[in-house]
């Protein structure tokens, strides 16, 4: 995960970050019902960040992007 909020130049997204973001975009564009699933996954990710940390939250995010939920 990168912190891009304070960047003064355009941010280049590549590697794993690009793969995850592309998967999320494709998932949300392909299914209307993915919107509610995204909200549910977002809540689960918030909880995972607090309880399990960034790696657990990232695993949930990748799982959602890969349409396994």
Image (cartoon, rainbow, N blue to C red):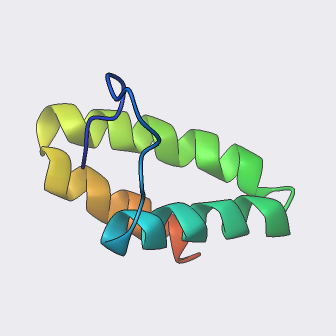
Q: x, y (%) of residue 16?
A: 33, 71
25 relative to 9 in the view: left or right:
right
Number of numbered discs overlaid on the protein picture: 0
Q: Position of residue 14 (x, y in %)?
A: 39, 68
- Is residue 19 depicted above or below 56 in this figure? below
Residue at 29% from the left image edge and 57% from the top image edge:
58
Image quadrant assignment for residue 6: top left
Viewer-proximal residue among 12 and 54? 12
Q: Residue furthest front?
A: 9
Question: Residue visible at 18% across and 31% down?
Answer: 50
Please tell me which residue lies in front, 65 or 19.
19
Percent position (x, y) of residue 53?
Answer: 12, 44
Residue at the right extreme of this rendering:
32
Closer to the camera, 61 or 12?
Answer: 12
Can residue 69 be seen in this snapshot? no
Report x, y in % for residue 59: 29, 64
Name above or below for residue 45 compared with residue 63: above
Locate the C terminus by quadrant.
bottom right
Find residue 67 and report its image quarter: bottom right
**Residue farthest to the top, as pictured:** 6
Say if 46 sits above or below 12 in the image: above
Relative horizontal placement of residue 58, taking residue 8 as reference (left or right): left
User: Which residue occupies 27% across, 51% down?
Assistant: 57
Going 73% across and 59% down the picture, which residue do you hit?
28
Q: Is residue 46 visible?
A: yes
């Amino acid at each position: 995960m990168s912190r891009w909020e304070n960047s003064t130049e355009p941010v280049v997204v590549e590697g794993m970050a690009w793969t995850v973001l592309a998967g999320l975009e494709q998932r949300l564009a392909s299914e209307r019902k993915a919107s509610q699933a995204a909200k549910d996954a977002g809540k689960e990710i918030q909880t995972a960040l607090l309880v399990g940390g960034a790696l657990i939250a990232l695993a949930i995010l990748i799982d959602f992007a890969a349409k396994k939920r």
